[in-house]
């Protein structure tokens, strides 16, 4: 049974590591529904969601770094203001 709580790491399996996670009931329901939709196991579904989430975070960081670079190099005050507004929205979610 899965309960909300901390993750624990168990012994490595070759190049992989088995872990145990506790999911809140709402997350378990959502993951279970997605697993049924895709025909994957709960474990594979969680793995897929982790990979997608980590990739999204990596891309977000790259976009932010690119925007910062463009902002620093910008010579046009109006363009710098626009880029500054976009950066603020990316950072603070406006």
Image: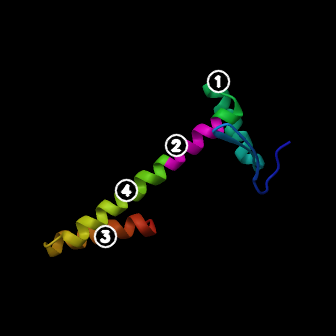
Q: Earlier in the sequence, mark 1 or mark 2?
A: 1
Q: Earlier in the sequence, mark 3 or mark 4?
A: 4
- Residue 79's quadrant in the figure? bottom left
Examine the structure image and report whether residue 52 is included in the region drawn in magenta: yes
Disc 1: which residue: 39
In what element is the residue under mark 1?
Answer: loop
Residue placed most toward the observer, 14 or 73: 14
Inspect this view and state whether residue 94 appears: no
**Mark number displayed over residue 26:** none
Residue extending furthest top?
39
Tell me if mark 1 has few (under 14), some (14-19) or many (20+) residues whose alpha carbon lies within 10 angstroms of its own. Answer: few
In what element is the residue under mark 3?
Answer: helix
Q: Earlier in the sequence, mark 1 or mark 3?
A: 1
* Region in magenta: 45-54
**Mark number displayed over residue 52:** 2
Residue drawn 66% across the image and 31% down it: 35
> Decide: marks 2, 3 in contact (CB < 8 A)?
no
Q: Indicate the position of residue 15 as horizontal and vertical percent values.
A: 63, 39
Q: Indicate the position of residue 9 as horizontal and vertical percent values.
A: 75, 50
Residue extending furthest right?
1
Query: How far is disc 3 from disc 4 in space, using C-alphas?
Result: 18 Å
Disc 4: which residue: 62
């Amino acid at each position: 049974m899965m309960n909300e709580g901390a993750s624990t790491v168990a012994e490595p399996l070759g190049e992989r590591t088995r872990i145990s996670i506790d999911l809140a009931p709402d997350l378990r329901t959502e993951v279970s529904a997605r697993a049924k939709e895709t025909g994957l196991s709960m474990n594979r579904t969680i793995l897929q969601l982790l990979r997608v989430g980590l990739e999204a975070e990596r891309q977000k960081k790259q976009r932010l770094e690119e925007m910062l670079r463009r902002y620093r190099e910008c010579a046009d005050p109006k363009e710098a203001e626009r880029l500054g507004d976009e950066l603020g929205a990316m950072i603070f979610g406006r």
